[in-house]
Image (cartoon, rainbow, N blue to C red):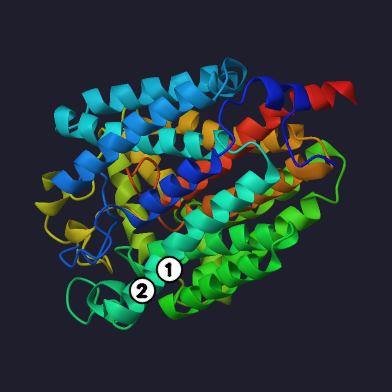
Amino acid sequence: MSTTYAPPTYSQEAVKSKQGWLPSAILLAIVFVSFRPFATEVAEVGVKSGGGDIVNQLGFGLIGIACFWLIKNNVSQHALKAFNRPSWYLVLGVLVVSILSADNPSGAARAMIFSLIVVLAAVTVVALPRSKEDMISCFTVGIGTALAFCWFAVLFVPEQGIHGGGGFEAQHEGLWRGVFDHKNVASYVMGAFVMFGLFTMRNGHPFWGGIISVFSIIFVVYAGSKTVLGVLPVAIATVFCARLISFRPLKALIILLPVIGLTTATLGAVIIEPILTTLQFYIPGLSYTGRTDLWIFGLEHLNKSPLFGYGFESFWGTQRVSNLEQPIELAWDVRGIVHGHNSWLDAAVNFGIPGAAIIIFVLTLLPVIDFLRIPKGGTAERLGGLYISIWVFTAMGANLESFFFRRADPVWFCMLIAIVGLRFTAHMTKGQRQSR
């Protein structure tokens, strides 16, 4: 069987570059590692921002130019049609409205530009490689490089690679974070790396895939993330079961069930009080490390501006919150929180309930639909399995962390690769489906 996952006529006529995996691998490594991987003045909470300083501003600006050039010169018009989706334009409209309603429109616009550059990087990573071997080379080199940087940080630059005992979250002392700003970010990225490694192992490269998977899972353990250690096997098992099912509605239900279930048990529990009461009956004191207080606080303020929200990056970490007196009933000091630790809630806070509904539709239902459209057998099915596994994993994680449109957030980048990969694979195998 051919290793190409696109129809042979397309792969012969449309692809101009046979080494598309190398720039894709470089992009993977750069976005995960950033341009300042061993900066010591990072905050204890949050993620590196693509627009945080002049180095990243220039670096990610150059990435945007490079991605545009690579796509223009190496990807056919037929392939680009995969991304010509009306619903994606609706999301762009939502983002524009959120910028106009932001407290600092120019700052919000700059932040959004860097967010869109990361989207463009994800498209480039997925669209350039033209075969299974290309994709494996891309993952092995790009992710292997990022993983090596993280281990180097832990072993040789511990002031960056390991949480210290001071700062806002002193309780994380000794936990690994690698080149990332927080152990939670590192944990989710490493969880995605495990899936990339497993894909590589199952597709003819057991040594390198095993190296990536083993060193990634060790990193998760030392990062102290019990959540990722619980969510990761659930995501893998969910996709394994879904791939055994032929009936598409049931397959979609299986994929969505863990995401819906965790959403119900987290944000749903503070919206519908009996759910939280029931959960606390079985798990006394359950608060998701104080997150329930943040979600209640965020929902209360969302009720004051439900239609348009507060604008992009115009709620958490702004004077609107930092100037408040700390409510004594909250476990966390909301004045120092950079996000609400729930991507779905923060989407509503930033974009309003209607805007969040559009974004949630595009980020949840459409990827599942694309997965269902990928034909069984061959490399396409294997790639689809990889992408949907990463999607389930990050979509579940979105209930406990906030990363949608957060510029160069590596967890957001993982989700983007999954969403773009599902869309691209479904589009490029359309002819194969029709010929069956």
Q: Is residue 142 visible in the rendered structure shown here?
A: yes
Q: Is residue 87 left or right of residue 339?
A: right
Helix, strand or loop at disc 1?
Answer: helix
The amino acid type, in three-letter code, at marker 1 is: Ala
Q: Is residue 373 above or below residue 211?
A: above
Per the model, the C-alpha gap separating discs 1 and 2 is 6 Å
The amino acid type, in three-letter code, at marker 2 is: Phe
- Indicate the position of residue 183 as horizontal and vertical percent values: 37, 69
- Indicate the position of residue 101 as horizontal and vertical percent values: 22, 26
Label of residue 427 in the image: none
Residue under circle 2?
Answer: 152
The answer to which image quadrant residue 341 occupies is bottom left
Q: Is residue 387 visible in the rendered structure shown here?
A: no
Residue under circle 1?
Answer: 148
Q: Is residue 49 above or below residue 360?
A: below
* Figure quadrant of the N terminus: top right
Residue drawn at x 52%, y 53% as measured from the top left: 394
Q: Nearer the viewer, residue 124 or 70?
A: 70
Helix, strand or loop at disc 2?
Answer: helix
Tags 1 and 2 touching, CB below 8 Å? yes
* Figure quadrant of the C terminus: top right
Q: Nearer the viewer, residue 387 or 293?
A: 387
Residue drawn at x 36%, y 54% as measured from the top left: 295
Disc 2 crowd rating (10 Å Cα; few below 14, some 14-19, many 20+) is some
Q: Nearer the viewer, residue 259 or 374?
A: 374
- Indicate the position of residue 124 as horizontal and vertical percent values: 48, 35
